[in-house]
Image (cartoon, rainbow, N blue to C red):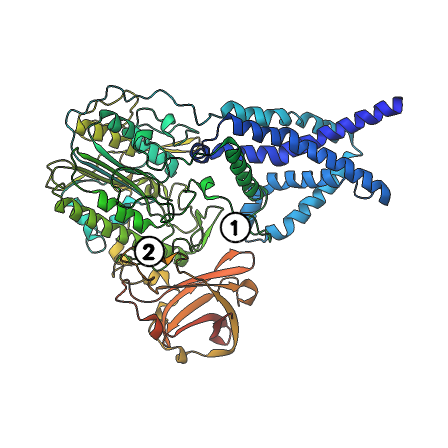
């Protein structure tokens, strides 16, 4: 009997240990990832029933499944000399090791350019095997695992404590709202757009590159010292719409921002509202057009579990792991379940809320918004947040596209980090990306001209309140982050364009006072005669008093800056000095061999050997959804991948020749695993400038430097 009791205790201890490993390797990563996806939980109407099923699966069913599987494996192992009896603990511990190491593996993958996805799983399994072997021998390890078993209870309880079901709605603050002087309001918020981009050498709006922004500046007040309060869209946009400084872990949902601008405007019942809101969810239910699809509890549970099943491998493995993972459903990223153009939403509707898919078919979003700028019985309140000139950079100033947004990589060329936010320490590659960004700012400039034309045609321009701004800036400095600020990049990321045309204003002005994005909501409310709520921390732009400092929030950190930071930190070198041709041609600073441009390939020694290259397909997978003035992609970008082992050096120069003449020279950049990428431009910035692709003979060459001189190696596309 004593032996049976001892064996039972050992078996129970092993079962608890397996449940502990399951909690750390599966339950904790899944619940942590889900807790961050508040937009997904909101859009999918997840309630307690679905959460209960998920927790039941993660806390009871899955762990017990592993325990039973362990019993089976141990029983079978007795038939082969007890080999493999610890297979299940080793697998679970491998998962724990991978989930704990993943942040460091991502760093090694992107910054050290190591193929961690290939060798880390077997290394993690080896480490798990060694740990289990020591576990059998060392009581201290067994005690440590026992203490860690609190995670079995803590992880699900923590998630349940912080979870708010979709059906819970907080008290609104829009009752009794009155607009004393309603008038047309147009609020346009661009994305990842530094106000410093618009400056020329005289610190004015560059009329050569951005003539429509200059036109806007001529009839509005340009707040040249305007700044954002966060580098994250899901924080910065709600700050604009609430007039409140960011709070840690606040979701971009209407219930989290009672009394926001949309709620007050709708509550006044004095406006016809149009809201394009791709990222946040602050618009009130009364104006929403994209009603959530009515799903049964079983369907919602199934969708939740299938989605998390697709997400989970990404929580423990890096992107270069040589395994094909299942596709993550679109709603996980806050995208419509069905792509734009296939979901049946009317493009002729001009009122209500429209939920487009962020960076998808942005040209269509702009066209749709322009159709909404029409007179109405009630003054129109028209809001547009569009993910422009944010990456991917695919548009030319003419409105033409040279790369499909859906075919673009998920991070810029020559960028590192899981989100592609850190630039390589390579000035040429970074300058090439900045040029593409500036081309897209040119496209935004074109849209501003269309907005002004549309308002003039409909006799709304003089009478409306027009505000044009952005959620946050962006930086292009080698070796620094594109989005996360440091002492050098803070002015670029903090700066946002801000143009405010008041009703009746016809004369432009420049204001360098300390203005922050939280000041826009009280300015709008004051202009239309709505009482500003006490919760608003911003100051109307009409008031002379300003904040004594600039505040910038990222995660739990807050940076305090001098109020005149952006005025004092003007660019030290005029843009015209580095880019005299504006946006017409790639600046020489973005090329590796500018002296070769215009020379014929036959003037260089060309090696007899060739190297295989995979040219990327830049075309739109759904050409029927292209914008009206972009029926065909302009052949401007030539992009491809070369195996790392085929390169003469770690980083190799590559040249593009068209009809035998060198037109561009750049540099390869590590992309993933054993692949290096290159991106080169053909001449011309408009469709009419580009040569007919059928008459273009494109040649690509790698440049090999040696003691005997320079030679070119031809790149040939794989069959």
Q: Quadrant of the N terminus?
A: top right
Residue 430 against residue 534 in the figure, above or below: below
Is residue 329 toward the left or the right of residue 154 in the image?
A: left
All told, the count of numbered labels is 2
Residue 515 against residue 572 in the figure, above or below: above
Given residues 218 and 487, the one toward you in this image is 218
Q: Looking at the image, is mark 1 or mark 2 earlier in the sequence?
A: 1
Asked if labels 2 and 1 touch by Cβ distance under 8 angstroms, the answer is no
Q: Which residue is mark 2?
A: 626
Q: Which residue is mark 1?
A: 110
Residue 543 in the image: x percent, y percent? 18, 27
Residue 330 against residue 4 in the figure, above or below: below
Around disc 1, counting alpha carbons within 10 Å, would you say few (fewer than 14), some (14 to 19), or many (20 or more)?
many
Q: Is residue 543 among what the camera can see? A: no
Around disc 2, counting alpha carbons within 10 Å, would you say few (fewer than 14), some (14 to 19), or many (20 or more)?
some
Residue 456 in the image: x percent, y percent? 13, 45
Q: Residue at x 49, y 43 (%)?
A: 329
Residue 230 in the image: x percent, y percent? 36, 36
Given residues 548 and 348, the one toward you in this image is 348
Given residues 715 and 474, the one toward you in this image is 715
Q: Is residue 176 among what the camera can see? A: yes
**Element carrying mark 1:** helix
- Kindly indicate the quadrant of the structure image that contains residue 575: bottom left
- Kindly indicate the quadrant of the structure image that contains residue 378: top left
> Label 1, label 2: how many angstroms apart (C-alpha)?
33 Å
Given residues 377 and 662, the one toward you in this image is 377
Residue 448 against residue 641 in the figure, above or below: above
Is residue 634 toward the left or the right of residue 719 in the image?
A: left
**Element carrying mark 2:** loop
Q: Nearer the viewer, mark 1 or mark 2?
A: 2
Image mark for residue 435: none
């Amino acid at each position: 009997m004593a032996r049976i009791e001892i064996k039972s205790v050992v078996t129970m201890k092993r079962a608890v240990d397996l449940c502990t490993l399951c909690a750390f390797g599966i339950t904790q990563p899944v619940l942590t990832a889900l807790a961050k996806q508040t937009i997904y939980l909101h859009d999918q109407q997840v309630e307690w029933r679905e959460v209960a099923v998920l927790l039941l699966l993660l806390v009871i069913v899955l762990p017990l499944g592993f325990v039973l599987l362990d019993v089976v494996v141990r029983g079978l192992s007795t038939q082969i000399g007890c080999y493999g009896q610890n297979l299940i603990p080793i697998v679970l511990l491998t998962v724990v090791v991978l989930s704990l190491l993943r942040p460091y593996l991502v760093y090694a993958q992107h910054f050290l350019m190591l193929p961690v996805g290939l060798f880390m799983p077997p290394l993690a399994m080896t480490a798990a095997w060694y740990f289990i072997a020591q576990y059998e021998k060392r009581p201290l390890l067994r005690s440590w695992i026992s203490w860690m078993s609190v995670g079995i209870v803590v992880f699900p309880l923590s998630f349940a404590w912080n979870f708010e079901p979709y059906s819970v709605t907080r008290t609104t603050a829009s009752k009794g709202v009155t607009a004393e002087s309603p008038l047309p309001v147009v609020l346009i918020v661009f994305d990842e757009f530094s106000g410093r981009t618009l400056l020329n050498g005289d610190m004015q709006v560059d009329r050569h590159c951005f003539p429509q922004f200059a036109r806007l500046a001529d009839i509005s007040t340009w707040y040249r010292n305007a700044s954002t309060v966060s580098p994250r869209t899901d924080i910065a946009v709600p700050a604009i719409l609430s007039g409140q400084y960011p709070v840690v872990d606040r979701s971009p949902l209407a219930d989290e921002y009672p009394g926001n601008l949309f709620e007050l405007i709708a509550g006044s019942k004095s406006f016809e509202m149009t809201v394009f809101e791709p990222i946040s969810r602050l618009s009130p239910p009364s104006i929403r057009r994209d009603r959530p699809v009515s799903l049964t509890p079983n369907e919602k549970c199934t969708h939740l579990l299938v989605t998390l099943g697709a997400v989970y491998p990404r929580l423990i493995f890096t992107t270069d792991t040589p395994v094909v993972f299942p596709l993550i459903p679109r709603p996980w990223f806050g995208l419509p379940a069905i792509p734009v153009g296939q979901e049946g939403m009317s493009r002729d509707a001009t009122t209500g809320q429209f939920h487009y898919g962020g960076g998808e078919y942005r040209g269509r979003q702009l066209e749709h918004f322009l159709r909404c700028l029409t007179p109405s019985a009630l003054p129109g309140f028209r809001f547009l947040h569009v993910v422009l000139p944010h990456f991917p950079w695919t548009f030319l100033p003419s409105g033409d596209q040279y790369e499909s947004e859906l075919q673009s990589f998920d991070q810029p060329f020559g960028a590192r980090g899981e989100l592609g936010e850190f630039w390589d320490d390579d000035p040429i590659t970074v300058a090439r990306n900045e040029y593409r960004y500036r081309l897209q700012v040119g496209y935004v400039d074109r849209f501003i001209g269309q907005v002004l034309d549309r308002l003039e045609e409909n006799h709304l321009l003089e009478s409306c309140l027009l505000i044009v701004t952005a959620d946050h800036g962006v930086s292009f400095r080698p070796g620094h982050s594109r989005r996360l600020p440091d002492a050098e990049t803070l002015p670029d990321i903090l700066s946002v364009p801000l143009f405010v045309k008041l009703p009746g204003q016809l004369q432009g002005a420049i204001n360098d006072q300390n203005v922050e994005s939280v000041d826009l909501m009280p300015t709008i409310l004051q202009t239309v005669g709505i009482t500003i709520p006490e919760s608003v921390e911003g100051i109307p732009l009409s008031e002379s008093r300003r904040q004594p400092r600039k505040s910038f929030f990222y995660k739990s950190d807050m940076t305090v800056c001098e109020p005149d930071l952006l005025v004092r930190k003007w660019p030290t070198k005029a843009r015209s000095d580095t880019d005299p041709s504006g946006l017409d041609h790639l600046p020489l600073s973005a090329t590796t061999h500018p002296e070769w441009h215009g020379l014929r390939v036959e003037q260089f020694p060309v090696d007899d050997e060739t190297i295989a290259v995979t040219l990327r397909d830049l075309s739109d997978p759904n050409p029927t959804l292209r914008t009206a003035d972009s029926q065909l992609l302009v052949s401007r970008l030539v992009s491809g991948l070369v195996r790392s082992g085929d390169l003469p050096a770690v980083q190799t120069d590559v040249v593009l020749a068209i009809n035998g003449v060198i037109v561009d020279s750049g540099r390869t950049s590590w992309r993933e695993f054993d692949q290096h990428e290159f991106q080169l431009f053909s001449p011309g910035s408009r469709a009419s400038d580009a040569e007919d692709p059928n008459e273009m003979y494109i040649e690509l060459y790698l440049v090999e430097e040696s003691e005997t001189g320079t030679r070119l190696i031809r790149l040939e596309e794989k069959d």
